[in-house]
Image (spheres, helix red, strand yellow):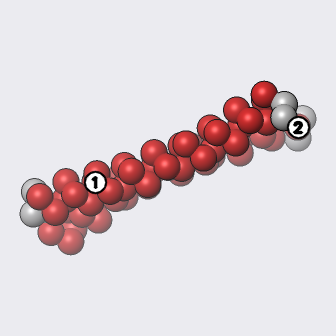
Amino acid sequence: MDPAVFEEWMMTGLVSILIIFMGFIVWDLAKKSKAGRFGTLILFFVLGLGIVAFVIKSVVIGLIESGSL
């Protein structure tokens, strides 16, 4: 297997696991701090923005490398 392909798979897989773990941490934080529905929504919204930024970055890099952008 080509090391670049392996690195890409591991990067995607491990970042996905990290995002899921961060979601659990935010949920636990919201529960322990008694943030309520709105507070929990805000916490997950901010985490979601970080995830969206990561996905957008990956898409833009893919477009740049393919020469489409």
* Of residues 17 and 57, the one drawn nearer to the viewer in this rendering: 17
Q: Is residue 9 above or below residue 24?
A: above
* Residue 8, quarter of the rendered image: top right
Q: Earlier in the sequence, mark 2 or mark 1?
A: 1
Q: Is residue 61 visible?
A: no
* Of residues 31 and 53, the one drawn nearer to the viewer in this rendering: 31
Q: How many marks?
A: 2
How far across and how far down the image is residue 26, in percent? 28, 54
Mark 1 highlights which residue?
Answer: 26
CA–CA distance in space, label 2 to label 1: 36 Å
Report crowding for label 2: few under 14, some 14 to 19, many 20 or more residues within 10 A (C-alpha). few
Quadrant where the C terminus lies? top right
Which disc number belongs to residue 6? none
Give the residue at x 10% y 57%. 33
Give the residue at x 15% y 69%. 36
Quadrant where the N terminus lies? top right
Give the residue type at disc 1: Val
Report crowding for label 1: few under 14, some 14 to 19, many 20 or more residues within 10 A (C-alpha). some
Give the residue at x 26% y 60%. 27
Q: In the image, 31: left or right of 41? A: left
Q: Quick check: marks 2 and 1 in contact, CB under 8 Å?
A: no
Q: Is residue 52 above or below residue 67?
A: below
Q: Is residue 55 visible?
A: yes
Mark 2 highlights which residue?
Answer: 66
* Of residues 28 and 36, the one drawn nearer to the viewer in this rendering: 28
Give the residue type at disc 2: Ser
How far across and how far down the image is residue 34, in percent? 9, 63
Q: Secondary structure at mark 2?
A: helix
